[in-house]
């Protein structure tokens, strides 16, 4: 059994005016995605509740939600553990994400304004700076911001939410893959191609560029997961 990490959750401040289960869900989800909670690591609901100063109920609800997303495995007698990063689940997440994001691109190409293009360019510039400075967590956040911005051009906030949930397994792999030399720069080039096509209202080019980008992301992630 993998030794449980010291999470230092007592340093986290929860907003008691907001649903605790949602905040705890997001907290544990982030720890799993960034790798602070590693595959096969035990998840101690009692310890988490004690450190956060809450009852076990919102922690249990958060863990159930993460179990439904495939990030945590709950075994009746053995305990609760972080799920492995599965190649088949990565590919399934990719299928879902690609279908949604290609449709997002198609719709965005019809309505992208100059202000939208500038916003995308600004995100790309900040992303490039983060990669150059080796701020990988920030780079991943800005990568997501770019894709979310495309959905927001369409006013499709639920679409991005569906993508965000489905891509959780891919995100875990991204925290392994982002430090690889040259991969971040490839992402920047691909994002520029997407933004350029959207600004030109060229739906076909935008869809092709997004498809190539997501294909590259999947292959990079699979290669890192296999190596680990």
Image (cartoon, helix red, strand yellow):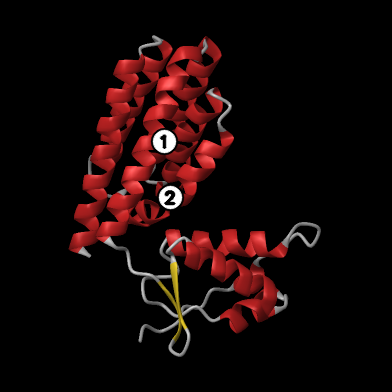
Name the residue carrying label 2.
Answer: 166
Q: Quadrant of the N terminus?
A: bottom left
* Rendered image: mark on residue 118: none
Q: Quadrant of the C terminus?
A: bottom left
Which residue is painted at 37% across and 44% down in the image?
96
The part of the image, by quadrant, that contains residue 17 is: bottom right
Q: Is residue 59 left or right of residue 190?
A: right
The part of the image, by quadrant, that contains residue 223 is: bottom left
- 5 lies above or below 110: below
Which residue is painted at 76% across and 57% down in the image?
18
- Of residues 171 and 103, the one drawn nearer to the viewer in this rendering: 103
Name the residue carrying label 1.
Answer: 100
Label 2: how many Cα within 10 Å (few below 14, some 14–19, many 20+):
many
Can residue 13 be seen here? The reply is no
- Residue 26 in picture, x, y percent from top left: 58, 58
Which residue is painted at 35% across and 12% down in the image?
202
Helix, strand or loop status at disc 1: helix
The part of the image, by quadrant, that contains residue 12 is: bottom right
- Residue 204 in picture, x, y percent from top left: 31, 17
Helix, strand or loop status at disc 2: helix
Label 1: how many Cα within 10 Å (few below 14, some 14–19, many 20+):
some
Can residue 136 be seen here? The reply is yes
Q: Tell me whether circle 2 and circle 1 mark residues in contact (CB < 8 Å).
A: yes
- The residues bearing labels 2 and 1 have C-alpha atoms spaced at a distance of 10 Å
- 52 lies above or below 223: below
- Residue 85 in picture, x, y percent from top left: 32, 63
First in sequence: mark 2 or mark 1?
1
- 109 lies above or below 17: above
- 208 lies above or below 91: above
């Amino acid at each position: 059994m993998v030794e449980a990490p010291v999470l230092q959750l007592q340093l986290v401040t929860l907003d008691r005016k907001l649903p605790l289960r949602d905040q705890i869900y997001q907290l544990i989800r982030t720890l799993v995605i960034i790798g602070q909670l590693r595959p096969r690591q035990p998840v101690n609901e009692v310890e988490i509740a004690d450190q956060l100063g809450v009852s076990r109920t919102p922690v249990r609800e958060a863990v159930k939600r993460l179990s439904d997303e495939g990030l945590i495995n709950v075994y009746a007698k053995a305990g609760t553990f972080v799920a492995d990063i599965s190649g088949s689940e990565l590919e399934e997440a990719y299928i879902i994400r690609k279908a949604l994001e290609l449709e997002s691109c198609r719709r965005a190409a019809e309505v992208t304004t100059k202000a939208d293009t500038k916003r995308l360019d600004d995100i790309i510039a900040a992303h490039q700076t983060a990669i150059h400075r080796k701020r990988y967590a920030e780079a991943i956040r800005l990568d997501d911001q770019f894709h979310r911005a495309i959905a927001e051009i369409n006013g499709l906030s639920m679409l991005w939410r569906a993508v965000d949930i489905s891509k959780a397994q891919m995100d875990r792999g991204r925290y392994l893959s982002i430090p690889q030399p040259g991969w971040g720069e490839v992402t920047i080039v691909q994002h520029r191609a997407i933004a350029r096509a959207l600004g030109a209202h060229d739906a076909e080019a935008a869809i092709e560029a997004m498809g190539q980008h997501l294909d590259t992301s999947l292959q990079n992630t699979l290669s890192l997961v296999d190596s680990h």
